[in-house]
Amino acid sequence: MKILVTGGAGFIGSAVVRLAMSRGHEVVNVDALTYAGSLGNVAPVADLPGYAFEQVDIRDRAALDRVFAAHRPDTVMHLAAESHVDRSIDGPGDFIETNITGTYNMLEAARAYWQREGKPEGFRFHHISTDEVFGSLPNDPSVKFTEDTPYDPRSPYSASKASSDHLVRAWHETYGLPVVLTNCSNNYGPYHFPEKLIPVVILNALAGKPLPIYGKGDNIRDWLFVEDHADALLLVVAKGELGRSYNIGGENERTNLELVRALCAILDEKCPKASGSYADQITFVTDRPGHDARYAIDPTRIRTELGWRPSVTVEEGLARTVEWYLTHEDWWRPLLERKGVGVRLGKG
């Protein structure tokens, strides 16, 4: 199968590209290489037969039409997006243009190609989204997001992703475009861009800097190892029911403070300080505006319909992630110089 992956030089997209290539698929990686993209993320597969890269911005419809015509993919996995909540607070315009208008361009380019090719039965447009579109949950383990949870986005980022989800469903209902959708919980793992919580904590710890935790650190997230997520995404694009959405979670709920303390304990073991613990560097900072209290995924649908469940516990995944950062300084060191990295954003 030839898969066109948008955002394939990003964190989750590159995990999809690497896994798809390892399974014998052909991949067309379409990425604008914005501040968070890096061809280093796909370096392990970049020289393999069947891999192609196109530096294209999904806001450029003419360029997308050219890519579809040149590569003639069997399916599309649309991951390209602006994704950092704090940046969306400071500059929502980029999120509207990329996540909404860019998705519109992708849908129209895919629809034109699908129709031109005679509407091939196996074609799919897989839209990859976030559980943040559902809003915030109470601190009650019995309450989780399902595919039927009403949308209630609280940040410019989640609102832009909710809008793109609605566009994808509309193109399925109105034009018959064969689509599947997924909404995932918080991802983490190797190649995570160093502006998100886990890499920030790891790299700040190693540098002797404060480990910033918003508010009291009691916000809860469900953590999904990125390689598990890539496995689920390839399963959904192959076997998911058309027009249907699937929630993908790690079944690993932790408060932010619990997560940071776990990272510190792993670092204490793998790279001990001369004295004391990395946990001594924990610092509580002013909370993010509109910070959702809790996200948690109910994975019943993907488990019962497609037989998928995560294979990596948060303890195992965090240890693997720390080990990766300790041995890949050549990857993350240059990224620290990129705009906004290491700076507190999203103060409102």
Image (spheres, rainbow, N blue to C red):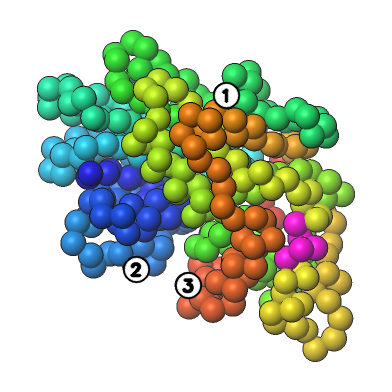
Q: Secondary structure at mark 2?
A: loop
Q: Residue furthest bottom?
A: 274
Mark 3, residues whose alpha carbon is within 10 Å: few (<14), some, or many (≥20)?
Answer: some
- The reply to whether the C-beta atoms of the residues labelled 2 and 1 are less than 8 Å apart is no
Mark 2, residues whose alpha carbon is within 10 Å: few (<14), some, or many (≥20)?
Answer: few
Report the residue at 59% width, 30% height from top.
Answer: 300
Is 262 in the magenta? Answer: yes
Nearest to N terminus: mark 3 or mark 2? 2
Q: Which residues are magenta?
A: 259-263
Residue 237 on image: x %, y %: 36, 36
Is 258 in the magenta? Answer: no
Foreground: 98 or 270?
270
* Mark 3 vs mark 1: in front: 1
Report the residue at 44% width, 22% height from top.
Answer: 244
Rounded to the nearest angstrom, the CA distance separating label 3 from label 2 is: 13 Å
- 275 up-or-down from 345: above or below: below
Magenta segment main secondary structure: helix
Q: Picture quarter containing residue 279?
A: bottom right
Q: Which residue is mark 1?
A: 147
Q: Is residue 64 visible?
A: yes
Quarter holding the C terminus is top right
Q: Which residue is mark 3?
A: 331
Q: Which residue is mark 2?
A: 44
Residue 331 on image: x %, y %: 47, 72
Q: Is residue 257 left or right of residue 237?
A: right
